[in-house]
Image (spheres, rainbow, N blue to C red):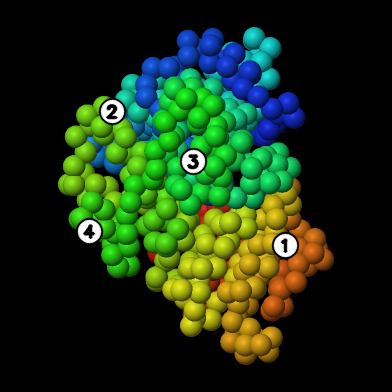
């Protein structure tokens, strides 16, 4: 039996011809496992992972067996597929990848890496007998492999610019792609503040789908929110997480009413107090490290706001790396606003390092310096030993950019 990694890396990441025909064929051969459980389908530029995880944890705490499919992964593929917060085992993952890949080849179906992963996740959730599955789109929505599901509650998180080469150059174009997950006669949860709200509303009207506004919550104090006149501890930091929480609670309100899940204050209290989502504005006090997988301008704006509100007075050491197809020029323009350069004298001691990590399509330091204008000088990193030395410094270390970069670093460096 081949290793799952060997098979997956041998497949294309994305097909040039977009569409769900290939995954429809393989799932039809598998007797359409995705039709055997209820689905919450989540699309958006940023916030998909956090929103998915909050919904997932509330459902689990209400005693519903729940599958969770997210991407990308930090350290291994198995992280992407969970049931009740337990990763699919390496053995089962390898077996299903081999079996479904072989089945696809026998039937002349050429699956991409993500299509194969999606097929495995949907089939695994069926084998485990889940009540609900929370699915995060991989790219866009309309032509995403996860859009093979026929009936679902849709949730649309923030819409902003990313993957412009595939999703379009305007908010309207991108919103059409994200809104492609909305099904006929279904329901969709979205915030009125969403940049693509009007487009999503039009798509919903066309499909006779009901638009549900995100739940009303308020920040009571740091890491405490008020919802329906009760204050809850909320474990995810940052004002942006309130947007994700309001969407998640809007979805939960709908599910609670539709399926009589009996989700009460105690379930919410337990879920919100303990929910985690790795490397999203995550702070490690002992090493004075802040990690954020902000890999597009929208995500970096959030990081900048966090730095300027919570870490303004701290000297910062930025460690950044990303893929070539990302708008890294705009990301750096935004991060400049968080640099304490003291009128370009750099007396504050802020530093910036670019990590040239080993990954297909990773941006090189040469390209980075050629196209960006940083307020402070940048230095090149190529070795983990260099990063280990930086981590020993007292200043706040801000790691941001590609999740593949972060995974490569922190699979070797332990966080405390």
- Marks 1, 2: nearer the viewer: 2
Residue pointed to by mark 1:
329
369 is higher (above) or lower (below) than 405: below
Residue pointed to by mark 3:
156
Question: Between marks 1 and 4, how big is the CA–CA gap?
Answer: 41 Å
267 is higher (above) or lower (below) than 185: below
Please tell me which residue lies in front, 286 or 378.
Answer: 378
> Callout 3 environment at 10 Å: few (<14), some (14 to 19), or many (20+)?
many
Q: Which mark is residue 231?
A: 4
Question: Between marks 3 and 4, how big is the CA–CA gap?
Answer: 26 Å
Q: Which mark is residue 161?
A: none
Residue pointed to by mark 2:
258
**SS assignment at label 1:** helix
**SS assignment at label 2:** helix
Residue at coordinates 34% horizontally, 47% vertically from top-left?
215
Q: Position of residue 68 (x, y in %)?
A: 41, 35
Q: Position of residue 126 (x, y in %)?
A: 39, 20
Please tell me which residue lies in front, 406 or 98.
Answer: 406
Residue at coordinates 32% horizontally, 25% vertically from top-left?
131
**SS assignment at label 3:** strand
In the image: residue 191, left or right of residue 274: right
**SS assignment at label 4:** strand
Q: Name the N-terminal-most of marks 2 and 3.
A: 3
Quadrant assignment, res 138: top right
């Amino acid at each position: 039996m081949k290793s799952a990694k060997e098979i997956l890396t041998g497949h294309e990441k994305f097909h040039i011809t977009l569409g769900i025909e290939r995954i429809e064929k393989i799932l039809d051969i598998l007797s359409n496992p995705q039709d055997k459980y209820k689905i919450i389908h989540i699309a958006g530029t940023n916030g998909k992972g956090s929103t998915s995880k909050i919904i997932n944890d509330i459902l689990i705490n209400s005693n519903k067996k729940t599958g969770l499919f997210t991407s990308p992964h930090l350290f291994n593929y198995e992280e992407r597929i969970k049931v009740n917060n337990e990763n699919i085992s390496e053995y089962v993952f390898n077996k299903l990848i081999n079996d479904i890949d072989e089945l696809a080849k026998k039937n002349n179906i050429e699956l991409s890496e993500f299509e194969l992963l999606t097929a495995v996740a949907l089939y695994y959730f069926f084998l485990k007998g889940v009540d609900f599955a929370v699915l995060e789109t991989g790219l866009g929505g309309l032509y995403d492999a996860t859009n093979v599901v026929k009936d679902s509650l849709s949730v649309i998180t923030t819409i902003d610019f990313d993957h412009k080469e595939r999703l379009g150059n305007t908010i309207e174009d991108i919103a059409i792609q994200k809104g492609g997950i909305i099904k006929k006669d279904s329901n969709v949860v979205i915030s009125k503040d969403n940049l693509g709200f009007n487009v999503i509303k039009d798509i919903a009207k066309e499909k006779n789908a009901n638009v549900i506004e995100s739940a009303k919550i308020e920040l009571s104090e740091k890491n405490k929110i008020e919802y329906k006149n009760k204050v809850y501890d909320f474990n995810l930091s940052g004002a942006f997480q309130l947007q994700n929480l309001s969407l998640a609670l809007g979805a939960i309100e709908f599910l609670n009413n539709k399926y009589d899940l009996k989700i009460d204050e105690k379930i919410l209290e337990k879920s919100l107090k303990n929910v985690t989502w790795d490397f999203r504005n995550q702070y490690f006090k002992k090493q004075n490290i802040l990690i954020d997988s902000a890999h597009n301008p929208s995500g970096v704006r959030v990081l900048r706001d966090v730095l300027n509100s919570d870490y303004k007075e701290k000297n910062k050491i930025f460690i950044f790396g990303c893929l070539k197809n990302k708008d890294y020029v705009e990301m750096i323009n935004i991060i400049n606003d968080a640099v304490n350069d003291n009128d370009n004298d750099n007396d504050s001691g802020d530093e910036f390092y670019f990590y040239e990590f080993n990954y297909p399509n990773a941006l090189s330091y040469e390209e980075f310096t050629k196209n960006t204008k940083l307020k402070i000088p940048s230095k090149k990193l190529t070795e983990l030993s260099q990063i280990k030395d930086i981590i020993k410094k007292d200043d706040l270390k801000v790691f941001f950019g590609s999740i593949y970069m972060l995974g490569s670093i922190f699979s070797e460096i332990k966080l405390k």
